[in-house]
Image (spheres, rainbow, N blue to C red):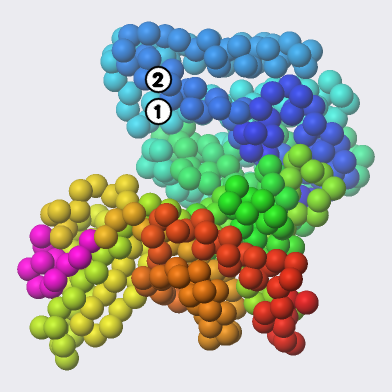
Amino acid sequence: MIVMKFGGSSVANADRIRHIAEIVREYRDHRPVVVLSAMGDTTDDLFEAAEQALHGHVVLDKIEKLHLDTVKALEIPHEEVTRRLNELRTLLTGISMLKEITPRSRDYLVSFGERLSVRIFSAYLNTINIRSEFQDSWDIGFISDSNYNNAELLPETYETIRKTLGSYASGKKDDGKAIPVVTGFLALDKKGFITTLGRGGSDLTATVIGASLRAEEVQTWKDVDGILTADPRIVPEAHSVPVATYDEVAELAYFGAQVLHPRSMRPCLQTGTPVRVKNSYNISAPGSIIVTKHTEKVPPVRAITTKQNVTLVDIVSTRMLGQYGFLAKVFEIFAAHEVSVDVVATSEVSVSLTVDEKTEELSSLRRDLAKFAEVTIRKDKAIVTIICDVRRSSQILAQTFKVLALKKINIQMISQGASKVNISMICNSSEAVRVVRLLHQEYFGSDSTVLTNTSGGKK
Protein backbone atom coordinates (compact mmCIF):
# COMPACT_ATOMS: atom_id res chain seq x y z
CA MET A 1 0.00 0.00 0.00
CA ILE A 2 0.98 3.66 -0.38
CA VAL A 3 0.08 6.95 1.29
CA MET A 4 -0.80 9.92 -0.94
CA LYS A 5 -0.76 13.37 0.64
CA PHE A 6 -2.16 16.39 -1.24
CA GLY A 7 -1.60 19.96 -0.10
CA GLY A 8 -3.96 22.91 -0.20
CA SER A 9 -3.16 24.00 -3.75
CA SER A 10 -3.94 20.48 -5.00
CA VAL A 11 -7.49 20.68 -3.60
CA ALA A 12 -8.01 24.42 -4.10
CA ASN A 13 -11.24 24.14 -6.12
CA ALA A 14 -13.55 21.75 -7.96
CA ASP A 15 -11.27 21.45 -11.00
CA ARG A 16 -8.26 20.56 -8.87
CA ILE A 17 -10.32 18.01 -6.91
CA ARG A 18 -11.41 16.34 -10.15
CA HIS A 19 -7.77 16.24 -11.21
CA ILE A 20 -6.40 14.61 -8.07
CA ALA A 21 -9.31 12.17 -8.06
CA GLU A 22 -7.97 10.90 -11.38
CA ILE A 23 -4.52 10.61 -9.84
CA VAL A 24 -5.98 8.51 -7.04
CA ARG A 25 -7.78 6.38 -9.64
CA GLU A 26 -4.44 5.65 -11.35
CA TYR A 27 -2.97 4.44 -8.05
CA ARG A 28 -6.06 2.58 -6.83
CA ASP A 29 -4.41 -0.85 -7.21
CA HIS A 30 -1.64 0.28 -4.82
CA ARG A 31 -4.09 0.45 -1.87
CA PRO A 32 -3.75 4.21 -1.28
CA VAL A 33 -4.52 6.03 1.95
CA VAL A 34 -5.21 9.66 1.01
CA VAL A 35 -4.25 12.53 3.35
CA LEU A 36 -5.57 16.04 2.62
CA SER A 37 -4.84 19.59 3.70
CA ALA A 38 -7.49 22.33 3.80
CA MET A 39 -8.69 23.71 0.47
CA GLY A 40 -6.63 26.59 -0.92
CA ASP A 41 -6.44 29.52 1.52
CA THR A 42 -9.05 28.16 3.91
CA THR A 43 -6.73 28.09 6.93
CA ASP A 44 -5.89 31.78 6.45
CA ASP A 45 -9.59 32.53 5.98
CA LEU A 46 -10.37 30.75 9.24
CA PHE A 47 -7.84 32.89 11.10
CA GLU A 48 -9.35 35.99 9.50
CA ALA A 49 -12.84 34.87 10.58
CA ALA A 50 -11.56 34.42 14.14
CA GLU A 51 -10.13 37.94 14.13
CA GLN A 52 -13.47 39.29 12.94
CA ALA A 53 -15.27 37.33 15.66
CA LEU A 54 -13.03 38.84 18.34
CA HIS A 55 -14.39 42.21 17.20
CA GLY A 56 -17.99 40.98 17.39
CA HIS A 57 -18.56 40.05 13.75
CA VAL A 58 -19.44 36.52 12.63
CA VAL A 59 -18.33 36.45 9.00
CA LEU A 60 -17.54 33.26 7.07
CA ASP A 61 -18.70 34.26 3.61
CA LYS A 62 -15.47 33.29 1.82
CA ILE A 63 -15.31 29.90 3.54
CA GLU A 64 -18.96 29.11 2.86
CA LYS A 65 -18.77 30.24 -0.75
CA LEU A 66 -15.68 28.17 -1.57
CA HIS A 67 -16.97 24.96 -0.07
CA LEU A 68 -20.62 25.23 -1.12
CA ASP A 69 -19.66 26.30 -4.66
CA THR A 70 -17.33 23.29 -4.81
CA VAL A 71 -20.08 20.96 -3.62
CA LYS A 72 -22.40 22.33 -6.28
CA ALA A 73 -19.79 22.11 -9.06
CA LEU A 74 -18.95 18.52 -8.14
CA GLU A 75 -22.63 17.58 -7.82
CA ILE A 76 -22.17 15.82 -4.49
CA PRO A 77 -24.40 15.66 -1.38
CA HIS A 78 -24.09 18.78 0.78
CA GLU A 79 -25.30 17.53 4.18
CA GLU A 80 -21.89 16.76 5.72
CA VAL A 81 -20.43 20.05 4.55
CA THR A 82 -23.44 22.06 5.70
CA ARG A 83 -23.27 20.37 9.11
CA ARG A 84 -19.62 21.36 9.56
CA LEU A 85 -20.27 24.94 8.38
CA ASN A 86 -23.09 25.28 10.92
CA GLU A 87 -20.77 23.96 13.64
CA LEU A 88 -18.17 26.53 12.58
CA ARG A 89 -20.72 29.35 12.72
CA THR A 90 -21.67 28.31 16.26
CA LEU A 91 -18.01 28.39 17.32
CA LEU A 92 -17.46 31.84 15.81
CA THR A 93 -20.59 33.10 17.53
CA GLY A 94 -19.18 31.91 20.84
CA ILE A 95 -15.87 33.67 20.17
CA SER A 96 -17.72 36.87 19.28
CA MET A 97 -19.67 36.77 22.53
CA LEU A 98 -16.66 36.00 24.75
CA LYS A 99 -14.27 38.30 22.83
CA GLU A 100 -11.62 35.65 23.48
CA ILE A 101 -9.96 32.75 21.71
CA THR A 102 -7.78 30.26 23.58
CA PRO A 103 -5.09 27.99 22.05
CA ARG A 104 -7.52 25.07 22.43
CA SER A 105 -10.39 26.85 20.67
CA ARG A 106 -7.98 28.06 17.97
CA ASP A 107 -7.10 24.44 17.15
CA TYR A 108 -10.80 23.56 17.07
CA LEU A 109 -11.35 26.48 14.68
CA VAL A 110 -8.48 25.58 12.34
CA SER A 111 -9.61 21.94 12.14
CA PHE A 112 -12.60 22.85 9.99
CA GLY A 113 -10.40 23.30 6.90
CA GLU A 114 -9.22 19.69 6.80
CA ARG A 115 -12.52 18.29 8.05
CA LEU A 116 -14.37 19.99 5.20
CA SER A 117 -11.87 18.99 2.49
CA VAL A 118 -11.93 15.25 3.29
CA ARG A 119 -15.72 15.17 3.29
CA ILE A 120 -15.90 16.86 -0.10
CA PHE A 121 -13.17 14.74 -1.70
CA SER A 122 -14.48 11.45 -0.36
CA ALA A 123 -18.00 12.24 -1.54
CA TYR A 124 -16.68 13.05 -5.00
CA LEU A 125 -14.68 9.82 -5.23
CA ASN A 126 -17.85 7.88 -4.44
CA THR A 127 -19.76 9.65 -7.22
CA ILE A 128 -17.16 8.49 -9.78
CA ASN A 129 -17.28 4.89 -8.56
CA ILE A 130 -14.14 4.96 -6.43
CA ARG A 131 -15.33 3.69 -3.08
CA SER A 132 -13.99 5.81 -0.22
CA GLU A 133 -14.79 7.00 3.28
CA PHE A 134 -13.62 10.14 5.05
CA GLN A 135 -11.80 9.76 8.34
CA ASP A 136 -11.01 12.42 10.89
CA SER A 137 -7.46 11.47 11.87
CA TRP A 138 -8.43 10.57 15.43
CA ASP A 139 -10.82 7.97 14.03
CA ILE A 140 -7.78 5.98 12.86
CA GLY A 141 -5.72 6.55 16.01
CA PHE A 142 -4.03 9.97 16.05
CA ILE A 143 -3.65 10.83 19.75
CA SER A 144 -1.46 13.71 20.94
CA ASP A 145 -0.42 15.63 24.01
CA SER A 146 -2.26 18.85 24.90
CA ASN A 147 0.30 21.28 23.52
CA TYR A 148 -2.30 23.12 21.45
CA ASN A 149 -1.11 24.69 18.16
CA ASN A 150 2.01 22.47 18.14
CA ALA A 151 1.05 19.08 19.55
CA GLU A 152 3.25 15.98 19.61
CA LEU A 153 1.80 12.57 18.81
CA LEU A 154 1.81 9.94 21.53
CA PRO A 155 3.56 6.59 20.91
CA GLU A 156 0.33 4.58 20.96
CA THR A 157 -0.73 6.35 17.75
CA TYR A 158 1.33 3.92 15.65
CA GLU A 159 -0.18 0.77 17.13
CA THR A 160 -3.72 2.12 16.89
CA ILE A 161 -3.23 2.98 13.21
CA ARG A 162 -2.06 -0.59 12.57
CA LYS A 163 -5.23 -1.88 14.22
CA THR A 164 -7.63 0.44 12.39
CA LEU A 165 -6.06 0.35 8.91
CA GLY A 166 -4.11 -2.91 8.96
CA SER A 167 -6.79 -4.95 7.25
CA TYR A 168 -7.14 -2.35 4.50
CA ALA A 169 -3.37 -2.17 3.97
CA SER A 170 -3.04 -5.94 3.69
CA GLY A 171 -6.17 -6.42 1.59
CA LYS A 172 -6.37 -7.80 -1.93
CA LYS A 173 -7.08 -6.05 -5.19
CA ASP A 174 -10.80 -5.53 -5.90
CA ASP A 175 -11.82 -6.64 -2.40
CA GLY A 176 -14.20 -3.67 -2.23
CA LYS A 177 -12.60 -1.96 0.77
CA ALA A 178 -13.11 1.80 0.79
CA ILE A 179 -10.10 4.11 0.34
CA PRO A 180 -9.57 6.07 3.57
CA VAL A 181 -9.46 9.86 3.05
CA VAL A 182 -7.86 11.26 6.19
CA THR A 183 -7.53 14.76 7.63
CA GLY A 184 -3.94 15.95 7.79
CA PHE A 185 -2.55 18.16 10.56
CA LEU A 186 -5.00 17.07 13.30
CA ALA A 187 -5.24 14.80 16.34
CA LEU A 188 -7.15 14.49 19.61
CA ASP A 189 -5.61 14.77 23.05
CA LYS A 190 -6.44 12.43 25.93
CA LYS A 191 -9.22 14.77 27.03
CA GLY A 192 -10.91 14.49 23.64
CA PHE A 193 -10.04 17.99 22.42
CA ILE A 194 -8.82 18.66 18.87
CA THR A 195 -5.13 19.55 18.50
CA THR A 196 -3.03 20.66 15.54
CA LEU A 197 0.40 19.24 14.79
CA GLY A 198 2.25 22.43 13.94
CA ARG A 199 4.56 23.10 11.01
CA GLY A 200 4.60 20.27 8.46
CA GLY A 201 1.63 18.69 10.24
CA SER A 202 -0.13 17.30 7.16
CA ASP A 203 3.10 15.76 5.87
CA LEU A 204 3.63 14.34 9.36
CA THR A 205 0.18 12.74 9.25
CA ALA A 206 1.12 11.00 5.99
CA THR A 207 4.51 9.77 7.18
CA VAL A 208 3.12 8.48 10.48
CA ILE A 209 0.54 6.43 8.57
CA GLY A 210 3.20 5.24 6.14
CA ALA A 211 5.62 4.26 8.91
CA SER A 212 2.88 2.54 10.95
CA LEU A 213 1.74 0.40 8.03
CA ARG A 214 5.21 -0.12 6.47
CA ALA A 215 3.96 1.45 3.25
CA GLU A 216 5.64 0.84 -0.09
CA GLU A 217 6.19 4.60 -0.14
CA VAL A 218 4.68 7.87 1.04
CA GLN A 219 3.90 10.28 -1.77
CA THR A 220 3.55 13.97 -1.02
CA TRP A 221 2.07 15.80 -4.00
CA LYS A 222 3.07 19.44 -4.47
CA ASP A 223 3.19 22.00 -7.29
CA VAL A 224 6.81 21.39 -8.34
CA ASP A 225 8.60 18.44 -9.97
CA GLY A 226 10.03 17.13 -6.73
CA ILE A 227 13.03 18.48 -4.82
CA LEU A 228 14.82 21.02 -6.99
CA THR A 229 18.45 22.04 -7.34
CA ALA A 230 17.44 25.61 -6.40
CA ASP A 231 14.36 27.73 -5.81
CA PRO A 232 12.77 28.07 -9.29
CA ARG A 233 11.75 31.64 -8.44
CA ILE A 234 15.47 32.46 -8.25
CA VAL A 235 16.78 30.00 -10.83
CA PRO A 236 14.09 29.24 -13.47
CA GLU A 237 16.26 26.50 -15.01
CA ALA A 238 16.47 24.56 -11.72
CA HIS A 239 15.73 20.87 -12.20
CA SER A 240 14.62 18.03 -9.98
CA VAL A 241 16.95 15.90 -7.88
CA PRO A 242 15.98 12.27 -8.58
CA VAL A 243 17.19 10.84 -5.26
CA ALA A 244 18.01 12.62 -1.98
CA THR A 245 18.69 11.42 1.54
CA TYR A 246 16.73 12.40 4.61
CA ASP A 247 19.78 14.33 5.87
CA GLU A 248 20.04 16.31 2.65
CA VAL A 249 16.35 17.19 2.61
CA ALA A 250 16.43 18.17 6.30
CA GLU A 251 19.23 20.63 5.62
CA LEU A 252 17.43 22.01 2.56
CA ALA A 253 14.29 22.61 4.62
CA TYR A 254 16.19 24.20 7.48
CA PHE A 255 17.99 26.62 5.17
CA GLY A 256 14.98 27.89 3.30
CA ALA A 257 13.87 25.37 0.64
CA GLN A 258 10.16 24.62 0.37
CA VAL A 259 10.41 20.88 0.97
CA LEU A 260 9.28 18.55 3.73
CA HIS A 261 9.89 19.77 7.26
CA PRO A 262 12.49 17.58 9.05
CA ARG A 263 10.00 16.78 11.80
CA SER A 264 7.58 15.29 9.28
CA MET A 265 10.22 12.94 7.85
CA ARG A 266 11.28 11.43 11.17
CA PRO A 267 8.74 8.53 11.24
CA CYS A 268 9.79 7.27 7.80
CA LEU A 269 13.46 7.78 8.57
CA GLN A 270 13.10 5.45 11.56
CA THR A 271 11.44 2.70 9.51
CA GLY A 272 13.31 3.26 6.24
CA THR A 273 10.07 3.99 4.37
CA PRO A 274 10.78 5.93 1.14
CA VAL A 275 9.11 9.31 0.68
CA ARG A 276 8.48 10.54 -2.87
CA VAL A 277 7.79 14.19 -3.75
CA LYS A 278 5.54 14.43 -6.84
CA ASN A 279 3.94 17.23 -8.85
CA SER A 280 0.15 17.15 -9.01
CA TYR A 281 0.31 19.50 -12.03
CA ASN A 282 2.71 17.18 -13.88
CA ILE A 283 1.75 13.59 -13.13
CA SER A 284 4.22 12.05 -15.57
CA ALA A 285 7.24 13.58 -13.83
CA PRO A 286 8.94 10.92 -11.65
CA GLY A 287 9.54 13.41 -8.85
CA SER A 288 12.18 12.93 -6.16
CA ILE A 289 12.49 10.01 -3.79
CA ILE A 290 13.91 10.47 -0.29
CA VAL A 291 15.87 7.53 1.11
CA THR A 292 18.05 6.79 4.13
CA LYS A 293 21.29 6.66 2.11
CA HIS A 294 22.52 6.75 -1.47
CA THR A 295 23.12 3.39 -3.09
CA GLU A 296 24.38 4.74 -6.43
CA LYS A 297 26.85 7.44 -7.45
CA VAL A 298 25.48 10.98 -7.31
CA PRO A 299 26.92 14.42 -8.12
CA PRO A 300 28.96 15.90 -5.27
CA VAL A 301 26.76 19.04 -5.24
CA ARG A 302 23.08 18.21 -4.85
CA ALA A 303 21.32 21.56 -4.45
CA ILE A 304 21.80 25.21 -3.46
CA THR A 305 19.44 27.18 -1.26
CA THR A 306 19.30 30.48 0.60
CA LYS A 307 17.76 31.81 3.78
CA GLN A 308 17.28 35.57 3.70
CA ASN A 309 16.95 38.16 6.47
CA VAL A 310 19.34 36.84 9.09
CA THR A 311 21.54 38.69 11.59
CA LEU A 312 25.23 37.92 12.09
CA VAL A 313 26.52 38.15 15.68
CA ASP A 314 30.29 38.24 16.28
CA ILE A 315 31.45 37.60 19.86
CA VAL A 316 35.16 38.01 20.76
CA SER A 317 36.86 37.69 24.14
CA THR A 318 40.65 37.43 24.43
CA ARG A 319 40.15 37.05 28.18
CA MET A 320 38.89 33.53 27.49
CA LEU A 321 42.14 32.45 25.79
CA GLY A 322 43.24 29.11 27.25
CA GLN A 323 40.18 28.90 29.51
CA TYR A 324 37.29 26.49 29.20
CA GLY A 325 33.63 27.47 29.31
CA PHE A 326 33.54 30.25 26.71
CA LEU A 327 31.03 28.58 24.36
CA ALA A 328 29.00 27.24 27.27
CA LYS A 329 28.65 30.77 28.62
CA VAL A 330 27.66 32.16 25.21
CA PHE A 331 24.95 29.60 24.55
CA GLU A 332 23.66 29.82 28.11
CA ILE A 333 22.87 33.49 27.43
CA PHE A 334 21.20 32.72 24.09
CA ALA A 335 19.07 30.07 25.83
CA ALA A 336 18.11 32.48 28.61
CA HIS A 337 16.89 34.97 25.99
CA GLU A 338 15.15 32.20 23.98
CA VAL A 339 17.07 33.08 20.80
CA SER A 340 17.60 30.21 18.36
CA VAL A 341 20.90 29.97 16.48
CA ASP A 342 21.20 28.88 12.83
CA VAL A 343 24.87 28.71 11.78
CA VAL A 344 27.97 28.75 14.02
CA ALA A 345 31.71 29.21 13.40
CA THR A 346 34.14 29.21 16.34
CA SER A 347 37.72 29.68 17.47
CA GLU A 348 39.19 29.55 20.97
CA VAL A 349 38.37 33.18 21.73
CA SER A 350 35.54 34.01 19.33
CA VAL A 351 32.29 32.75 17.97
CA SER A 352 30.27 34.01 15.01
CA LEU A 353 26.69 32.91 14.60
CA THR A 354 23.48 33.80 12.83
CA VAL A 355 19.98 34.33 14.18
CA ASP A 356 16.66 34.95 12.50
CA GLU A 357 16.14 38.64 11.80
CA LYS A 358 12.56 38.30 13.07
CA THR A 359 14.03 37.69 16.53
CA GLU A 360 12.85 40.33 18.97
CA GLU A 361 15.09 43.23 19.94
CA LEU A 362 18.61 41.94 20.60
CA SER A 363 19.75 44.77 22.87
CA SER A 364 19.27 42.86 26.14
CA LEU A 365 21.07 39.81 24.68
CA ARG A 366 23.91 42.03 23.56
CA ARG A 367 24.11 43.67 26.98
CA ASP A 368 24.55 40.30 28.72
CA LEU A 369 27.15 39.11 26.21
CA ALA A 370 29.07 42.39 26.54
CA LYS A 371 29.80 41.59 30.20
CA PHE A 372 32.59 39.25 29.09
CA ALA A 373 33.10 39.84 25.33
CA GLU A 374 33.07 42.38 22.53
CA VAL A 375 29.89 42.01 20.50
CA THR A 376 29.17 43.15 16.94
CA ILE A 377 25.72 42.72 15.41
CA ARG A 378 25.30 42.98 11.64
CA LYS A 379 21.87 42.81 10.03
CA ASP A 380 20.67 42.28 6.45
CA LYS A 381 22.64 39.09 5.92
CA ALA A 382 21.74 35.85 4.16
CA ILE A 383 22.79 32.21 4.42
CA VAL A 384 23.63 30.44 1.17
CA THR A 385 23.87 26.69 1.66
CA ILE A 386 25.42 24.13 -0.68
CA ILE A 387 23.99 20.65 -0.10
CA CYS A 388 26.88 18.42 -1.02
CA ASP A 389 29.26 15.61 -0.20
CA VAL A 390 31.36 17.32 2.46
CA ARG A 391 34.08 14.70 2.01
CA ARG A 392 34.94 16.76 -1.06
CA SER A 393 34.69 20.12 0.69
CA SER A 394 38.18 21.26 -0.36
CA GLN A 395 37.33 20.95 -4.04
CA ILE A 396 33.85 22.42 -3.61
CA LEU A 397 35.11 25.38 -1.59
CA ALA A 398 37.97 26.05 -3.99
CA GLN A 399 35.61 26.14 -6.96
CA THR A 400 33.01 28.18 -5.09
CA PHE A 401 35.42 30.88 -3.94
CA LYS A 402 37.01 31.06 -7.37
CA VAL A 403 33.60 31.87 -8.90
CA LEU A 404 32.68 34.41 -6.21
CA ALA A 405 36.11 36.07 -6.23
CA LEU A 406 35.84 36.71 -9.97
CA LYS A 407 32.58 38.57 -9.30
CA LYS A 408 34.05 40.42 -6.27
CA ILE A 409 31.54 38.89 -3.85
CA ASN A 410 32.80 38.73 -0.27
CA ILE A 411 31.81 35.81 1.97
CA GLN A 412 31.77 36.92 5.62
CA MET A 413 31.56 33.56 7.39
CA ILE A 414 31.59 29.88 6.53
CA SER A 415 30.38 26.82 8.44
CA GLN A 416 30.46 23.11 7.62
CA GLY A 417 27.47 21.23 9.01
CA ALA A 418 27.89 18.37 11.45
CA SER A 419 25.55 16.30 9.25
CA LYS A 420 28.32 16.21 6.61
CA VAL A 421 25.94 17.21 3.84
CA ASN A 422 26.09 21.01 3.86
CA ILE A 423 28.43 23.98 3.64
CA SER A 424 26.88 27.31 4.64
CA MET A 425 28.18 30.77 3.78
CA ILE A 426 27.10 34.20 4.99
CA CYS A 427 26.85 37.12 2.58
CA ASN A 428 24.88 40.35 2.34
CA SER A 429 21.16 39.83 1.70
CA SER A 430 21.44 42.01 -1.40
CA GLU A 431 23.95 39.54 -2.90
CA ALA A 432 22.25 36.24 -2.01
CA VAL A 433 20.21 35.78 -5.18
CA ARG A 434 23.25 36.51 -7.34
CA VAL A 435 25.36 34.03 -5.35
CA VAL A 436 22.78 31.25 -5.78
CA ARG A 437 22.52 31.89 -9.53
CA LEU A 438 26.29 31.95 -10.00
CA LEU A 439 26.82 28.73 -8.08
CA HIS A 440 23.90 26.99 -9.76
CA GLN A 441 25.35 27.84 -13.16
CA GLU A 442 28.76 26.61 -12.02
CA TYR A 443 27.57 23.25 -10.69
CA PHE A 444 24.47 22.54 -12.80
CA GLY A 445 24.80 24.66 -15.94
CA SER A 446 24.99 22.98 -19.33
CA ASP A 447 28.66 23.94 -19.69
CA SER A 448 29.65 22.84 -16.19
CA THR A 449 32.82 20.76 -16.12
CA VAL A 450 33.74 20.92 -12.44
CA LEU A 451 34.05 17.97 -10.08
CA THR A 452 34.07 15.36 -12.84
CA ASN A 453 35.69 12.32 -11.31
CA THR A 454 34.69 8.80 -10.43
CA SER A 455 32.95 9.67 -7.19
CA GLY A 456 29.85 10.76 -9.08
CA GLY A 457 30.52 14.25 -10.38
CA LYS A 458 28.84 16.11 -13.22
CA LYS A 459 29.19 14.53 -16.64
As displayed, is residue 428 above or below residue 31? below
Q: Is residue 293 above or below residue 349?
A: above
Name the residue beneath numbered marker 1.
Answer: 106
Q: Residue 418 in the image: x percent, y percent?
A: 45, 76
Residue 369 on the magenta span: yes
Res 233 label: none
Of the pair 3 and 401, the residue shown nearer to us: 401
Q: In the rendered structure, are the residues bearing label 1 and label 2 in contact, judged by CB atoms less than 8 Å apart?
A: yes
Indicate left or right for 358 with 330 as reference: right
Q: Residue at x 58, y 51 (%)?
A: 234
Label 1 sits on a secondary structure element that is helix
Q: Amino acid at mark 1?
A: Arg
- Residue 6 drawn at (x, y percent): 68, 39
Q: Which residues are magenta?
A: 367-377
The residue under label 2 is 50
Count neighbours of disc 2 (C-alpha within 10 A) and say few if under 14, some if 14 to 19, many if 20 or more. many
Residue appearing at x 31%, y 12% in the figure:
55
Q: Which residue reaches farthest left?
A: 371
Local secondary structure at mark 2 = helix
Q: Determine if residue 215 is in view.
A: no
The answer to whether residue 258 is seen in the rendering is yes
